Image (cartoon, rainbow, N blue to C red):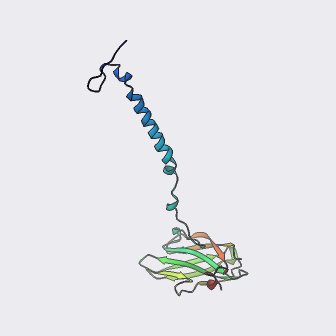
Amino acid sequence: MISIHRRGGSTPGRFGAALDPRKPRLVASLAIGAALVVGTTGCSMISPQATTIGYAAAEGVNVPDESGPLEVRNAQIVANEDGSEGNFVAAVINRTDESHTLTIELGEGSSVIPLTLRVPAGATISLGADGEEPLLVEGLDTPPGADIVGFFQSGDGTGVLVSVPVLDGALDYLAPLAP
């Protein structure tokens, strides 16, 4: 029978390290710990966090920044019952030092409805709120519940196409916005 004695916490000799029972346990503990860390956090490392994704938290849509320097938030049309006309409602924000014009084209082909709005430097215009009248859209021909294609452009932006929802005044807070 061979007996190995330890002095000062280490095993002498060339084969002593292989006989140390702590090494396999340490390696196994580290492997299990690493597997637990990767297993419990692995999905969140590659998945986007929902709180970092921008979205419109209302009925309307937000227009992407490629439209130009003006920001358009919660854009929607509140239409009459047959969808022949409606009011364009949105918040338009100008964070720049100069005034800009927002150009909106609703619809497609030969039935495009043009709208324009001048926004002063550093101002926010809330169409349909804060005493601001909404923009009347005549010849809409889009029933409530549908979407209409809108092209938004301001300043030197390239402009973007957005599907703008058409709503009716059935909800109490939208009723005053219907034409």
Q: Residue furthest right?
A: 82
- Camera-side residue: 101 or 62? 62
Quadrant position of residue 132: bottom right
**Percent x, y of residue 22:** 38, 29
- Camera-side residue: 106 or 5? 5
Horizontally, is 8 left or right of 32 in the view? left
Residue 124, placed above or below residue 20: below
Residue 10, placed above or below residue 167: above
**Percent x, y of residue 7:** 27, 23
Name the residue at 64% across, 73% down. 165
Residue 177, placed above or below residue 70: below
**Percent x, y of residue 124:** 48, 80
- Camera-side residue: 6 or 115? 6
Q: Note whether residue 110 is visible.
A: yes
Horizontally, is 152 left or right of 85 in the view? left
Name the residue at 52% across, 78% down. 92
Residue 42, placed above or below residue 110: above
